Image (cartoon, grey):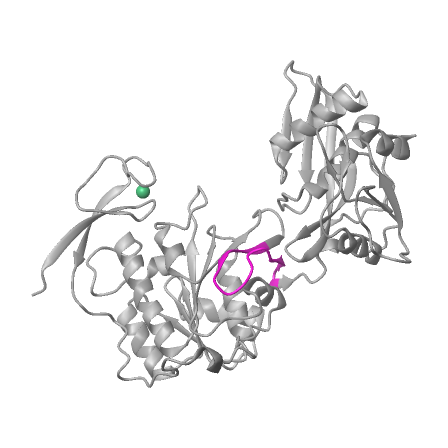
Amino acid sequence: MAKVKTTFFCQNCGTQYAKWLGQCTACKEWNTIVEEIVQKEEKSSWKNETSPAKRTSKPLLVNEIDTTQEVRLDTKDAEFNRVLGGGIVPGSLTLLGGEPGIGKSTLLLQISLKLPYKTLYVSGEESQKQIKMRAERIQPESKQCYILTETKTQNIFKQITAIEPDIVIIDSIQTLHTDYIESSAGSISQIRECTTELIKFAKETATPVILIGHITKDGHIAGPKILEHMVDTVLQFEGDRNHIYRILRSLKNRFGSTSELGIYEMQGSGLREVTNPSEILISKNDEELSGTAIAATLEGMRPLMIEIQALVSTAVYGTPQRSTTGYNAKRLNMLLAVLEKRAGFRLGAKDVFLNITGGISVDDPAIDLAVVAAILSSNEDIAIEKRICFAAEVGLAGEIRPVNRVDQRISEAEKLGFEMIFVSKHNKISLKNTGIQIKLVGKIEDVVSELFG
Ligand SMILES: [Zn+2]
């Protein structure tokens, strides 16, 4: 019989301890350290003897290594491909995190059904019948997607050996358990061991594996931070459950950039790729309302037009309220102070509410000028014409500062039918013969007099 060994793990960050402690020394959380039974055996569920390795590694001279074509699996989902950096890398482990109910399973099931490869979708959360019902709503004609309801890694690998899939999807890592560890599914040691087995399998057979991981209330992938260190790519699926849009972003990517963003719209039949996000982020009412302004922002490499809404009203209960959604509250306070000091607007006794529509959050400083414009528009109760947009940062002295990749922002605005864009006069614009009027401004006062006379 194998020797039974116990260790202590912090359930928050995954740090291992030899004895119990009240506070984790790594993440400083209290009462997170729990004893787990770990049955030590020099074994892993994934044994490669039965399945021929698709790729064996041998040393190559540097100049013999072929870099001309990087093989990536096309997922047939443009948004997913972009966030991954151009498709799935063979043998890679990808973690898709997100809050429960946000649509992680829907996204991966949908991708599984579209994939032009033999796919094994392993679910520990839903029965085969339940998944079949969902699949029929999304993409009924898929022929290469196998569904398996299983939580034990030994049995999963048995099926993998039989089917030999090109890609494996696990929904979710928290439901898996391996026989070599005694503790319950979802515990740190189970998650760690199951992930190790999957990494071994992925690397030895060059089969990519995608894991779903649930996120706790405080935004961490449930259980261990350790999981994020083990995998090659960490994707996060987010969005307000009350909004119909979902945002896929990459938090870590060993094979590409982390600045790309994918946008989906949640529909009855699944998630629709949003290829032109600017159109959906701007509300389509024809009426011109005060308190809204459009900003030309960038998410990753992609220009994005977003709508900023502000509401300025006299504070009823003494202390004025300041509230923001999708925008940094400290930055809002700074801009209000600038408006007060440099442009003479008395906003100190006013409530100010600021909202970025579509439920997304933006930290691009280039939306400053649109924020300022929306606040002033609400304060003066004068609507800004729908044909106008903004792309500039606002400095502490009330100066309008240049922003990066301004040409790209201007082109996007022009493409979407805007007729005028406010940018800093210090921006170097190399665009020629644009159909959009470029308004160069240097100070906040210039913008105020242009907009409100
Ligand atoms: Zn900890």
Q: Is residue 109 visible?
A: yes
Please tell me whether residue 261 belongs to the stretch shown in magenta: yes
Give percent across and percent down for residue 102.
52, 53
Give percent across and percent down for residue 118.
47, 80
* Residue at left offset 59%, top offset 46%: 242
Image quadrant where residue 28 sits: top left
Give percent across and percent down for residue 122.
39, 69
Q: Is residue 75 left or right of residue 175?
A: right
* Residue at left offset 32%, top offset 71%: 200
Image quadrant where residue 204 sits: bottom left
Question: Is 57 placed above or below 368 here?
Answer: below
* Residue at left offset 66%, top offset 44%: 364
Question: Is 83 placed above or below 8 here?
Answer: below
Q: Is residue 201 left or right of residue 280?
A: left
Q: Which residues are magenta?
A: 247-271
Q: Nearer the viewer, residue 244 or 335?
A: 335
Please tell me whether residue 154 belongs to the stretch shown in magenta: no
Q: Is residue 269 visible?
A: no
Q: Quadrant of the N terminus?
A: bottom left
Of all residues, the one furthest to the top in this rendering is 318
Q: Nearer the viewer, residue 225 or 67?
A: 67
